[in-house]
Image (cartoon, rainbow, N blue to C red):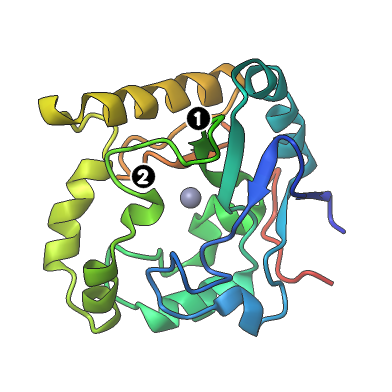
Amino acid sequence: MQNLVEIKNDDNFVVDLMYAGMAHNMTGCPVYEEIGLGNHAYVHADLWNSLQKIIPYLHKTGRKLKIYEAWRPVLAHKRLFEIIPQDGFFIPDASCSPHCRATAIDVALIGADGKELEYPTLVDAYNDQYAKEVQTGKLDNFFEYLKKASFNYHDDTMFEAIKNRDELRKIMTDIGLVPVPRLHEWWHYELPDGRTDKYPLIDNFY
Ligand SMILES: [Zn+2]
């Protein structure tokens, strides 16, 4: 399947794609179920190889890497943009999203106690109230809240959350992935050349 490798639930990874279910989904629509992908996380083999390098860290700490988003079929991207067409949420052009090239991943760490570590926001800056607002086209409050998801957001009352965010950044960059500082997405990492023609868009999952 077009150099795609599936990340499966095991001792290292927990797959819970946010746009497959309803529990943690800013769009309120299980788009991946609708298109038949379901809760299956695929990444390009190059990204898969990078992720293997994180396993010694996971074993040493007893942690797991939770996968919230991986390859996003172009069809799914179009559907997500239809649901929330407002500027600044989903990129209108799927070719601008490395997720559609299977070269990006949205992640958070789960601690040895089985609970997700604390971060300045949830992944995708998910929040029940803002999700409802966003789905009705009201983004002002959400965008204000989204500032907390920036890499350089700082708040002395969030010491633990910011420490965890910075540690995630260290382990992900240590395995050769890069964040996108202009995005307010502490959870997003991608291959350094993941937006180039070396990795074409992948349309479907057949
Ligand atoms: Zn992402």
Q: Give, as a three-letter code, the residue at label 1.
A: Val
* Percent x, y of residue 168: 46, 27
Does dot 2 land on a helix, a strand or a loop? loop
Quadrant in which the C terminus appears: bottom right
- Please rate how many residues cluster around mark 2, counting C-alpha atoms within 10 Å: few if below 14, some from 14 to 19, many from 20: many
Name the mark on residue 178: 1
Quadrant in which residue 201 is drawn = bottom right
Lateral position of residue 152 relative to residue 60, left or right: left
* Percent x, y of residue 152: 23, 29
Name the mark on residue 185: 2
Quadrant in which the N terminus appears: bottom right
Residue that appears at 62% across and 24% down: 62
Mark nearer the N terminus (2 vs 1): 1
* Percent x, y of residue 185: 36, 44
Q: Give, as a three-letter code, the residue at label 2.
A: Glu
- Residue at disc 2, CB closer than 8 Å to ligand 1: yes
Q: Considering depth in this image, is 33 or 22 the residue closer to the camera?
A: 22
